[in-house]
Image (cartoon, grey):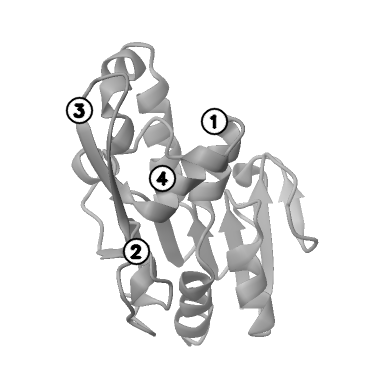
Amino acid sequence: MRVLIACEYSGAVRDAFIKQGHDAMSCDLLPTDSPGPHYQGSVFDIIDQGWDLMVAHPPCTHLAVSGSKYFAQKIADGRQQAALDFVRRLINAPIKKIAIENPVSVISSKIRKPNQIVHPWMFGHPMSKATCLWLNNLPLLKPTNVVDKGDFKTWVCSTTGKTKRQSQWMYDAACVARTPAERSKIRSKTFQGIADAMANQWGNLA
């Protein structure tokens, strides 16, 4: 099977499909973090090259509800609309089997509701991170190893004074990251258990 992993620089999902014997390639504007087949550039340069399956991770910066306090500005200057148009182009790509992955976002209200929401704890990682999947001609992912949901951190935001609660691993990522870009990179990487489930379950479809 020829598999395109769009908007991925970590190589996690790409390498999971390669391990299953598939012809997989990642694509992103950034270079890959892990050596392997990778196209650095726009996904739309190569999207019509006869792929059987695409798993896409479009940027969530202007879409995720976690950043809703900035939505008014992003709607006004067109950034959110551009991000939504990008997702629509991916969903309507000339590829039979498509999975779009994103956190809880306005894709649900502006385009369509996700087919499924999964968490790392459903695939062997004791951590919580709501991951939405919009699927075309693909079955729902089946949990492979349900474990504990992990620890949570409650803290008070120094800017707003509001009490917040989030997964401990996400809180830790914010603490160790040196820049916002580094924090985003840590939080956005696909967990290995989910990547393996995608390759094992979707890669075996006729």
Q: CA distance from mark 4 to mark 1?
A: 13 Å
Q: Which residue does the image show at 66% across and 61% down from the upper left?
A: 11
Task: Please provide percent x and percent y for residue 79.
Answer: 41, 21
Q: Earlier in the sequence, mark 1 or mark 2?
A: 2
Nearer to the camera, 86 or 159: 159
Residue bearing mark 3: 162
Q: Nearer the viewer, mark 3 or mark 2?
A: 3
Dot 1: what SS? helix
Q: Callout 3: 10 Å neighbours few (<14), some, many (20+)?
A: few
The amino acid type, in three-letter code, at marker 1 is: Pro
Residue, x 31% and y 18% (percent of image)?
159
CA distance for labels 4 and 2: 30 Å
- Image mark for residue 171: 4
Please tell me the numbered disc located at residue 180: 1
For mark 1, does the 10 Å Cα neighbourhood hold few (<14), some (14 to 19), or many (20 or more) residues?
few
Q: Is residue 164 left or right of residue 27?
A: left
**Between 173 and 182, which is closer to the camera in this rendering?**
173
